[in-house]
Image (spheres, rainbow, N blue to C red):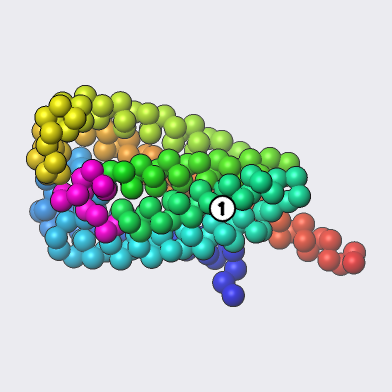
Amino acid sequence: MVRDEHLLKGTWLLILLTALTSMTIHLLSGNSRAIPFFISESDYPGFERLVFTAGFTFAGVLLCALSMRLAHTFDSTSNQNLSHVAKWLGLISGVSLICMSWFNTHDHIIIHSMFAMAVFMGGYAWSFTTHLTLSNTPSLGHARRKVWMVVGAVSFAVMNLSLARPVRTHVIDGGLRDGTEIMNLSQSGINIAAPAEYILFLSLAMMLASFRFDLEARGNASEEVTPRQ
């Protein structure tokens, strides 16, 4: 069986590499609509779409598996309910990531945006609730997560505030549904929202990566107890 530490590392690395690779291909191939662009814009016809869809689909499966494994590993009698909530939030994030990767933002911008929000909000809530289940066993990961949680919350707010007026003007009032057209008209907001999304995406990955320290602490504690038995 794959160790928790390896599953964790494989998950957050795959998420980062998928985004970085698909965006790089999208940019270098000359398919980018404008700069900066959203991560999801790299889900564009061509090799970048294959990387984006395959990478995030597999990453979503790993997220589902990881949420169940961490809920079991970090489970305690005092936080069983919270651990159960964290598990379901992780599953929602994983399933949403899979669905998001199959509804591209160019042709299905409304559906894609709904799943993307579920990934961002669900992933943040999952990290936060899992963080709370470990409140009695502080570690280096515990301290780092606090920093990334603040960074994630601020970047999420900036991203949404930057898009509020364009969304209202072009989607709600204007009734537009073509993703590319909406993004072209909203580029002034995307100039701020896209970098904020990059920071939010990185913060979520780093929150996930920080659980390595908690797994190591849990493993060291088990090794200390075993010889005494």
Front residue of 55 and 219: 55
Which residue is farthest right? 228
Give the left or right position of residue 80, taking residue 160 as reference: right
Q: Residue at label 1?
A: 87
Q: Quadrant of residue 203?
A: top left
Q: Magenta segment, which residues?
A: 101-112
Give the left or right position of residue 64, taking residue 100 as reference: right
Q: Does the magenta run of residues contain 106?
A: yes
Residue at disc 1, secondary structure: helix
Q: Position of residue 171 (x, y in %)?
A: 17, 33
Which residue is farthest bottom? 1
Front residue of 116 and 25: 116
Q: Residue at x 69, y 49 (%)?
A: 80
Q: Residue at x 52, y 46 (%)?
A: 126
- In the image, residue 220 sits, relative to residue 156, either above or below, namely below
Q: Position of residue 153 (x, y in %)?
A: 44, 32
- Would residue 54 be seen by someone viewing this image from the given angle? yes
Q: Residue at x 68, y 40 (%)?
A: 135
The quadrant the N terminus occupies is bottom right
Q: Amino acid at mark 1?
A: Lys
The quadrant the C terminus occupies is bottom right
Q: Position of residue 196 (x, y in %)?
A: 32, 35
Give the left or right position of residue 208, taking residue 131 as reference: left
Q: Residue at x 32, y 39 (%)?
A: 197
Give the left or right position of residue 46, taking residue 136 as reference: left
- Would residue 191 be seen by someone viewing this image from the given angle? no
